[in-house]
């Protein structure tokens, strides 16, 4: 994993994005040079064309899953997605070239070279030698925590080779299967050298009483092997802070949770710019949604509900009404569930494509919400969840968001258990939030909306 602006990326993702940016820059550079040469408009044309095309390409790529490191698509399926990506980029290329005098040859050259780049992307996705991205991991421990690490590694990252489990001297019983146990006859350092280990994850159930061979772990680190604890491991590999592996001390003394006036000012400017652009783009869709809601179920068009915001302050979240007017006629709050029979036909559709969330953009302009952050919950559920789930209140240290890291990483939640799972992603966001992570979440939100993941 590679840490960029407080956010962890898999090295395969970094390789894919870097490759696309480099190829796109070369395409734009050669196209501009061949069209106009170096003159007074060279740099403005180069910069504007590159920024517009790369942002559009990354958005389309994220939406179509090109940057997923785990997928089972065939080369034919990826080729079909590449064709769809090209079709999405055609209007962008036309808009860029249309603003130039005699821009037709310019646009045609961009179109052809972009098509070749997409073909190259498909080829590289399937032909890159897998051993270039592989990582060998040893888990130090054989108890329940070690088993949890091993299971998560094998499930979430096919580029990882799990070398095995090395027992601590104080561990009496093994929760992992016998095939994965490494011989205790050799020292930890010797096994690391023999197995060419890249990373050691310390996952001990009990860390007191000399259970950790600190000298050997230090020797391994001096050999260039990464040594991480279980909480840090889950943070960087899964993008979450696991409630079953974190401690208050780790949160207090570790890095992250950076706030300040500069970060707040940058985030506020980002929110205003994004909200204004999206309101302008989606205003016709919002008008159509409003008309359809009235035609099916009458007024009101909007649905207001009290939610808990930053620092526990209450505010009214505004959405397009997607449920019947008598959805909670008994006054008892309920979780929204899959196939909720309280939804109208129009409401079911606008929930699937997230149109019902669009009025919240005005809450962003007003300052009650942010574009990216934890989803705001109702006071009834917040009181219950704060009692049942440790560290739940931490998510209220930042503004709630229209979208968020938990929304793009986890399915729609409809229970206390789902809320606990989503909190682990919210904690990651609160700890590592930055403008860069906000942009990543916005790109991934496009993919969630296009693929209709998580909507209820």
Image (cartoon, rainbow, N blue to C red):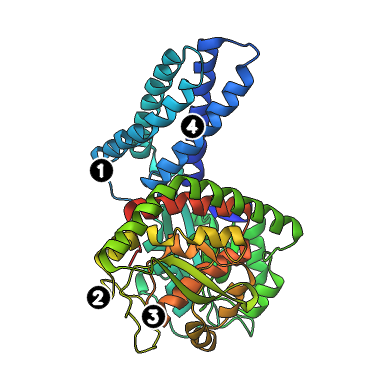
Residue 216 as seen in the image, left or right of residue 338:
right
Please report contact status of discs 4 and 1: CB closer than 8 Å, yes or no: no
Q: Residues within 10 Å of mark 4 (few under 14, many from 20)?
A: many
Q: Secondary structure at mark 4?
A: helix
Q: Looking at the rendered structure, which numbered label has been put on residue 74?
A: 1
Of the two numbered discs 4 and 2 in the rendering, the one whose residue sits closer to the viewer? 2
Residue found 65% across the figure and 56% down from its top: 268
**Mark 4 lies on residue:** 53
Q: CA distance from mark 3 to mark 2?
A: 17 Å
Q: CA distance from mark 4 to mark 3?
A: 41 Å
Q: CA distance from mark 3 to mark 1?
A: 36 Å
Q: Earlier in the sequence, mark 3 or mark 1?
A: 1
Of the two numbered discs 3 and 1 in the rendering, the one whose residue sits closer to the viewer? 3
Q: Earlier in the sequence, mark 4 or mark 3?
A: 4
Location of the C terminus by quadrant is: bottom left
Who is closer to the viewer here, 379 or 39? Answer: 379
User: x and y percent of residue 451 in the render?
Assistant: 32, 53
Residue found 70% across the figure and 63% down from its top: 258
Q: Secondary structure at mark 1?
A: loop
User: x and y percent of residue 86 in the render?
Assistant: 35, 32
**Mark 2 lies on residue:** 341
Q: CA distance from mark 4 to mark 1?
A: 27 Å
State whether residue 119 appears in this view.
yes
Q: Residues within 10 Å of mark 1 (few under 14, many from 20)?
A: few
Residue 287 as seen in the image, left or right of residue 171:
left
**Mark 3 lies on residue:** 415
Who is closer to the viewer here, 281 or 410? Answer: 281
Q: CA distance from mark 4 to mark 2?
A: 43 Å
Please report contact status of discs 4 and 3: CB closer than 8 Å, yes or no: no
Q: Residues within 10 Å of mark 3 (few under 14, many from 20)?
A: some
Residue 451 as seen in the image, left or right of residue 110:
left
């Amino acid at each position: 994993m590679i840490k960029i602006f407080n956010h962890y990326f898999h090295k395969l993702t970094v390789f894919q994005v870097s490759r696309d940016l480099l190829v796109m820059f070369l395409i734009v550079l050669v196209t501009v040079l061949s069209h106009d040469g170096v003159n007074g408009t060279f740099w403005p044309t180069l910069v504007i064309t590159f920024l517009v095309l790369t942002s559009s390409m990354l958005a389309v790529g994220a939406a179509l899953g090109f940057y997923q490191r785990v997928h089972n698509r065939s080369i034919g399926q990826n080729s079909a997605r590449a064709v769809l990506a090209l079709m999405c980029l055609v209007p962008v290329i036309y808009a860029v070239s249309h603003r130039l005098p005699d821009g037709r040859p310019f646009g045609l050259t961009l179109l052809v070279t972009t098509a070749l780049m997409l073909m190259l992307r498909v080829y590289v996705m399937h032909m890159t030698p897998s051993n270039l991205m592989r990582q060998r991991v040893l888990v130090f421990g054989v108890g329940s925590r070690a088993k949890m690490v091993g299971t998560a590694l094998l499930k979430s990252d096919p580029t990882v080779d799990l070398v095995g489990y090395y027992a601590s001297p104080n561990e009496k019983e093994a929760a992992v299967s016998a095939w994965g146990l490494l011989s205790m006859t050799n020292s930890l350092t010797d096994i690391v050298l023999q197995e060419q280990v890249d990373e050691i994850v310390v996952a001990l159930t009990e860390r007191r009483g000399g259970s950790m061979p600190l000298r050997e772990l230090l020797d391994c680190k001096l050999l260039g092997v990464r040594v991480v604890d279980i909480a840090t491991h889950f943070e960087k590999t899964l993008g979450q802070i696991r409630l079953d592996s974190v401690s208050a001390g780790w949160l207090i003394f570790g890095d992250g949770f950076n706030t300040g006036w500069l970060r707040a000012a940058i985030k506020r400017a980002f929110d205003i710019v994004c909200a204004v652009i999206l309101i302008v783009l989606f205003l016709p869709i919002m008008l159509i949604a409003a008309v359809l809601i009235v035609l099916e179920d009458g007024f009101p068009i909007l649905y207001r509900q009290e939610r808990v915001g930053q620092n526990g302050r209450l505010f009214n979240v505004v959405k397009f009404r997607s449920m019947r007017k008598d959805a909670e006629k008994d006054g008892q709050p309920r979780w929204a569930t899959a196939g909720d029979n309280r939804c109208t036909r129009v409401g079911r559709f606008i929930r699937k494509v997230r149109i019902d969330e669009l009025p919240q953009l005005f809450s962003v302009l007003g300052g009650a919400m942010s574009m990216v952050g934890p989803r705001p919950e109702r006071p009834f559920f917040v009181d219950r969840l704060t009692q049942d789930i440790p560290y739940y209140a931490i998510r209220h240290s930042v503004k709630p968001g229209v979208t968020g890291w938990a929304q793009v990483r986890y399915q729609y939640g409809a229970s206390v258990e789902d809320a606990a799972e989503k909190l682990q992603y919210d904690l990651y966001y609160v700890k590592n939030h930055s403008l860069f992570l906000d942009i990543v979440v916005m790109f991934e939100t496009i993919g969630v909306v296009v693929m209709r993941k998580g909507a209820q």
